[in-house]
Image (cartoon, rainbow, N blue to C red):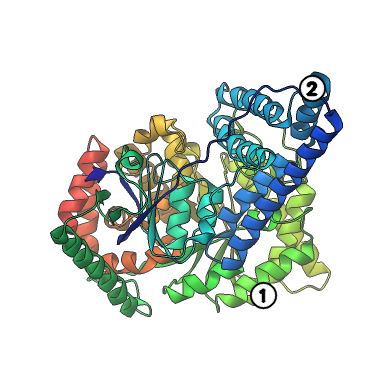
Amino acid sequence: MLKGIAASAGVSIAKVYKLETPVVFVTDEKISDVEAEVAKFNAAMEKTIADIEGIKDRATKAGRLSAEEIAVFDAHLMMVQDPELAGQIVSMIKDQSVNAGYATELVSNMMVMMFESMDNDYFRERAADVKDVTFRLKANILGVMIPDLTAIDEESIIVAHDLTPSDTAQLNEFVRGFATEIGGKTSHSAIMANSLEIPAVVGCAGVLGAVKTGDMLALDALDGFVVVNPTEEEVAAYKAKAEAYAKEKEELKVLVNEPSVTTDGHHVELAGNIGGFKDVAGVLKNGGEGVGLFRTEFLYMDAEDWPTEEEQFIAYRQVLEGMQGKKVVVRTLDIGGDKHLKYYDFPEEMNPFLGYRAIRLCLDQKDIFRTQLRALCRASVYGQLCIMFPMIATVQEFRDAKAIYEEEKAKLLAEGVAVADNIQVGMMVEIPAAAVLADQFAKYADFFSIGTNDLIQYSMAADRMSQKVAYLYQPWNPSILRLIKMTIEGAHKEGKWAGMCGAMAGEPNAVPILLGLGLDEFSMSASQILKARRIVKSLNKKDAEALAAKAVACDTADEVLALVKNTLK
C-alpha cells in the first residue's frame, strides 16, 4: 500500500497500464548530406505539429476537457512553430554538420537550462513544456514510437512518473484512473482528471517501481491510497467502497432541483465555473443556480486574432440564453501570466504573474477592452448579466474600468441599441490589498467574487504550481480566512453581495466556514455543486457562524481543518 494525494475523487480496481517513456538516444554523429538532414528535420517537425494538432482535435471532439485544458495544446503548438526553435536547430545542422537529433537535443537543453535558471516560477514551469515538445520532436526524427494511449482497449489504471497534458488528453473510456509519482492537487493532470471525472492519486512516490503492466491495482482516490495486487479481502473492501461512492453520487442527484438552504432557512447560491457555452449543460445538469465565473479569455486564446465585437456578442448571448435567466458573472479578459495569445507579444518580465496582465492590460489597451464591453452590453438583454473585472488592486483602477463601461453603455444607447438596465458591475478580490480595503471598494462595486487561487499564493508568497512550496498553499490558514472575512464584511457593510469562484468554494471542508463567514455565492466546478448543496442543507447558520469565529482565531491551518472535520462528523 502506497500513500499519495487524492486529486480526483473515486475508487477503482483494474489492471495496470504502466506508462514508460521510450528511450530516445541521440549520438554526436556528423553527417555529410546537410540538405538531406535538414529535410529530415523539417519532416519530423511537420509530423510533430500534426501529432499535437491531432491530440488537440481528438480531445476537443471527445468533449471531455474544458476550453482551459484544451488551450494547453495551443501553447505547445506556439512553441513548436516558433521560428526561433527551428532556426537554431537548422543553423546548427548546417554550421556544424551535426545530425538533426543531436542538434535538437542541444538546442532543447539550452532552452531548458535557460528557463530552469530563472528566478520566476512561471518561466521555470515552461521548461517542462519545452521538454514535452522537443521530446516528441526527437522521437519523430529518430522514428521512435511514443505510446498511443487512445489504443487502450480494456479497463486499465495508468501508472506513470507523471502525465503530460498530451497524455491526459488521450485518455479514453477504458481508463479507470491513474496514479503518478509526482504532482499536486493543482497540477495539469489533477485538473484534467477532475474534468474527466476519473479517480486520480498523484504524488505517490515509488508507485512506478512497485508495479508492472498487467498487475491488479486498487486506486483509492478518496483517501489517497494505491494498493498493488490487492488480496481478495482488499478487493472486496474497495469494491464496496466504490459502490458506496457511486451510490452517494446517485443519491446526490435528488438535490438537483432543491434550494441551497440551511436547516434554519438561510439561502446561499451555488453556481458553476465555465469556460464557454459547452459547459452550460453541466452546470444545469448539476443544479447550478447560475454561473459564478465565465472565463472569457478562452474566446481570445482559441482565436487567430482579437475576436470581434460580433463574435464575442454571439458567445455571450449563447451563454446568457443557455442559463435560462439565471445569473451569469462574466469575467472580462484575464490574459497574461501563464495565459498567452498567439497573435500578441507580451513584454518580457521577471514575474509575469505580478505584471502586465488582466485589468492592467485592458486599461492600457482600451480599444480591446471597449470591444468586449460593447459585446457584453449588447448581450445583456438576453439574460441576467454581471460583469466582473479581474486583478483589481486599487480603487482608482476599478473606477477607471467602470467609467469605460459606462461610456460604452451610453454610446450604445445613443445608437439606439438595447442594453439591460440591471447589469451589475463588480470585481474579483484576489490581491490582498483589495481584501484589506474591501469596505472602500464596496462603495463603487456591485459585488465581489473572491479568487482564492491567487489570493492564497499572493498572500503566502508561494507559487501554487511549485512542488517545493506546495505546503504553503493553505486555504484554511487563519490569515486567508481573515482576508475572506474582511471582504465579505466590506461588501455587506454597503449592502452588496460577496461570492467566491476560486477552488476553495467547492472544498467540502471549506463550505461550513465560508457559510459562517457570510459568503452569499459559492461558484465551483459543476461536478462539485450537489455535494456542496448537501453540506449546506445539513448545516445550521448559527452553528456555522460559531465555527467560523473559532476558525479565524486558530493559529494554524491544521487546527482549522481539524475543527471543521469534527463539526462535519
Nearer-N-terminus badge (1/2): 2
Where's residue 162, x and y in %? 44, 42
488 or 501: nearer the eye? 501
**Foreground residue among 79 and 348:** 79
- The answer to whether residue 403 is left or right of residue 310 is left
Q: How far across and how far down the image is residue 72, in percent?
A: 60, 49
**Res 464 visible:** yes
Residue at x 44%, y 38% (from the top left corner): 464
Residue 290 x %, y %: 49, 70
Q: What amino acid type is highlighted by mark number 2?
A: Ser
10 Å crowding of disc 2: few (<14), some (14-19), many (20+): some
Q: CA distance from mark 1 to mark 2?
A: 65 Å
Q: Nearer the viewer, residue 17 or 65?
A: 17
Q: Nearer the viewer, residue 346 or 88?
A: 88
The reply to whether the C-beta atoms of the residues labelled 1 and 2 are less than 8 Å apart is no
Q: Indicate the secondary structure of the residue bearing disc 2.
A: loop
According to the image, label 2 marks what residue?
97
What residue is shown with label 1? 381
Mark 1 neighbour class, 10 Å CA radius: few under 14, some 14 to 19, many 20 or more = some
Q: Looking at the rendering, which quadrant does residue 532 occupy?
A: bottom left
The secondary structure type at the circle numbered 1 is: helix
